[in-house]
Amino acid sequence: MALDAICLQAVTLELRPQLLGLRIDKVQQPARDQVILLLRGGLRLLLNAGANNPRIHLTAQLRDNPAEPPMFCMLLRKHLVGARVAALSQPGLERLLELELDVTDDFGQPGKRTLVLEAMGRHSNLILLDEDRRVIECLRRVDPEMSAERPVLPGLFYQYPPAHGKTYLSDATEDHFFDQLAAANPERQMDAFLLDCFFGVSPLMARELTFRTTGETDSRIFSLDEAGKRRFWQEIAELQAAVKENSFAPISLWRDGKPMEFSCVPIVQYGELVESRTYPSFSALMDDFYESRERQERIRQRGADLIRTASGARDRLRRKLAMQEKDYAATQDRDVLRLSGELITANLYRMERGQSKVTCENYYDENRELTIVLDPLLTPQENAAKYFKRYAKAKTAEKYLKEQMEIARRDAAYLESVLEEIAEAETEQDFNDIRSELKDAGFLRQKGREKKGLQRPAKPREFCTTAGLKVLVGRNNRQNDKLTRDADHRDVWFHTQKIHGSHVILCTGGKEPDRDSIVEAAKLAAWYSQARESGNVPVDFTQVKNVKKPAGARPGMVIYSTCETVNVTPEEEMVKRLAGK
């Protein structure tokens, strides 16, 4: 869901005491719609003006920046670096927030700048104003042809979005509500009625108020009797009170491990179909909510071609393997071919050219009669030679097919691991590394001259156990190889048992690790594997010196001689806690 006006009020109230008086040290624009202000004290304020996820909050996520900053970023740096946050406000119950800044110009003269975030869906924008509230620049310019009512261009005075006759939820009165309800179409759904009449109500909140009134989310106005109408107003009045008293709680809703909605008040309309999570702050909520959503979106967009390549190659291998297994099964009956050749040879004196079959005694089976099919165009000797040739061919094919099936199984397993890598990819460099790995493996062809992506050295994920031991987790197969190869032979290596996942190294410094560190490292191995959503996951662990890479093996493929196994259940909270340390 998009950030609604009520949630934006809660975020504003939370951010104001944290930001006031802080200086802006740096300005970054990691994506077209995202600007990050690095504030004194190490705080990172993210302003997103994207159509699908406009928002503002403090973030702990580190994002890759382009090699050359966009023009809008350079302009913000010129005006805002060194500025001090003077005020943070939300005009009315609008979906916009103003960040007022005290600045000093090149001549040392004090001045004012205002950075406005309009979090209004596809009309979202980020606008920089001077002290006269003229537009200096904006992320998206809106000319008169796009909006004659409210153009947004450099040099124009800034205007608030029009209200279009709606009433702010916080200003609604009981009499006004009942007048609007009486004038509404009885066939109108209650949630649509709320969206038509009031500012500050999101579709989620409109459905929630409807559900709390009638027990359904799609009830219509005609279904309300007088008691129902009063109950409807009472629910609105309670939400009004929460807004006026700033009684908010950061809550997100998840379904099947994926972020679904978030709110500043409890949501009950979904019942037990969703998991409700409460956070210590709205910044923590939105950082987690959108990071999870954006990770899935990155995988869908940036990894789409990689997923298509890897899954297509894997599926082809599976079909090829199925045919090879069928052919291999046929070679297991080759003794019948040898027997037929021997029996034909033993009965040449009884045979003539032109026969289509011969029936003779099988001296390997108590002289029981056996009928052998012949080629009438061949002599008996040629028929016997044909059966012996087919037998020899089947014998050779068995060895060849066995080798090819092993290669196909190995490559299919390798591609499964690559698909797991793509699912775990977090940065642009991760995708570049996977793409390069697939090219080296021969599964991806280079088409023309490709632009070089970010070439920063990719580092493994790093964690610290409760006991203070460092844990390293590989991001891709080639990094898994390097991680295991470079580790101290006394360190402990972890991997999910017969499940694709990352190599995990527990750095022990030559000492015996404690049991809690072993369990925590095993949980990290389970989390960064295909068993992330499972419970009681078996994880093998052994010293690095016991892990070997076979000659010619694909990246990430190893064998190990001795190991112990621990069963663990992956825990997201533990992963975040160990990463934070």
Image (tube, grey):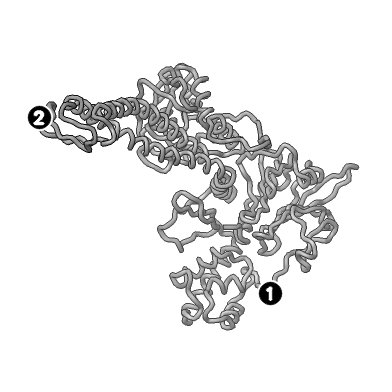
The answer to which of 435 and 16 lies nearer the viewer is 435
Measured in 3D between alpha carbons, the distance from the residue under mark 1 to the one under mark 2, in whole angstroms, is 102 Å
Q: Position of residue 543 (x, y in %)?
A: 41, 20
Q: Which residue is mark 1?
A: 165
Check disc 1 and report its element: helix, strand or loop: loop
Q: Position of residue 342 (x, y in %)?
A: 20, 25
The answer to which of 499 and 407 lies nearer the viewer is 407
- Residue at 46 percent across and 39 percent down: it is 314
Q: Is residue 406 left or right of residue 159?
A: left
Instruction: Decide: is 58 above or below 353.
Output: below
Check disc 2 and report its element: helix, strand or loop: loop
Q: Which residue is mark 2?
A: 367
Q: Position of residue 94 (x, y in %)?
A: 67, 63
Q: Residues within 10 Å of mark 2 (few under 14, many from 20)?
A: few
Using the rendered view, name the quadrant where residue 564 is placed: top left
Say which amino acid is labelled 1: Gly
Using the rendered view, name the quadrant where residue 536 is placed: top left
Q: Position of residue 396 (x, y in %)?
A: 34, 25
Q: Is residue 277 left or right of residue 432?
A: left
